[in-house]
Image (cartoon, rainbow, N blue to C red):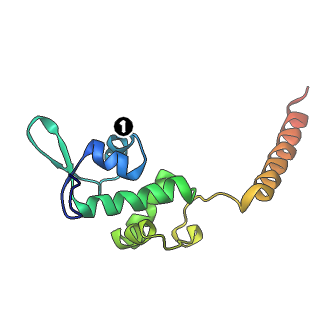
Amino acid sequence: MAKGPEAFRTISEAADELHVPQHVLRFWETKFAFIRPMKRAGGRRFYRPSDITVLRGVRRLLHDEGYTIKGVQRLHREEGLRRLVSAGDGEGISPASAGAAAPAAGRDGLLAALGDLETAKQRLDALLKP
């Protein structure tokens, strides 16, 4: 029998729903103060529907949008939970508006960044040669 949409979820159910391992949810609790599932006897975690919604936003930002942990923390600090929830609902977020680190636009941007790094390395190597 499936749980209703308002039912609490165990960590395994939450992990399955979000397509992340359980240890990732535990790790996120250490990095994001706003993730606070209820804990019952023996430390069992139970996630409310609102927790799942926030976690969905965090997952999307980290895994799909290319945000860093610090970027998500900054986004939460500057724009609050509503912005994280909207990310989970599929609304686009401009990483520049939150000052977050985001990936360059596709493969071409990454190749350009790699070229810049290689040029900088060559300059440093030339300076360090005796």
- Point 48% across, 70% down: residue: 90
Q: Residue furthest top?
A: 130
- Give the percent coordinates (x, y) of residue 87: 45, 68
Mark 1 crowdedness (10 Å alpha carbons): few <14, some 14-19, many ≥20: few
Task: Report the number of discs.
Answer: 1
- Point 24% across, 53% down: residue: 36
Quarter of the rendering occupied by the C terminus: top right
Asked where in the image residue 67 lies, by quadrant, the reply is bottom right
Identify which residue, 74 or 50, lies in the foreground.
Answer: 50
**Which residue in the structure is indicated by mark 1?**
23
Identify which residue, 25 or 19, lies in the foreground.
Answer: 19
- Point 32% across, 41% down: residue: 26
Does residue 67 show up?
A: no
Identify which residue, 58 or 49, lies in the foreground.
Answer: 49
- Give the percent coordinates (x, y) of residue 22: 34, 39
Vertical order, 82 against 10 (above or below): below
Three-letter residue code for mark 1 = His
Q: Secondary structure beneath disc 1?
A: helix
Does residue 34 show up?
A: yes
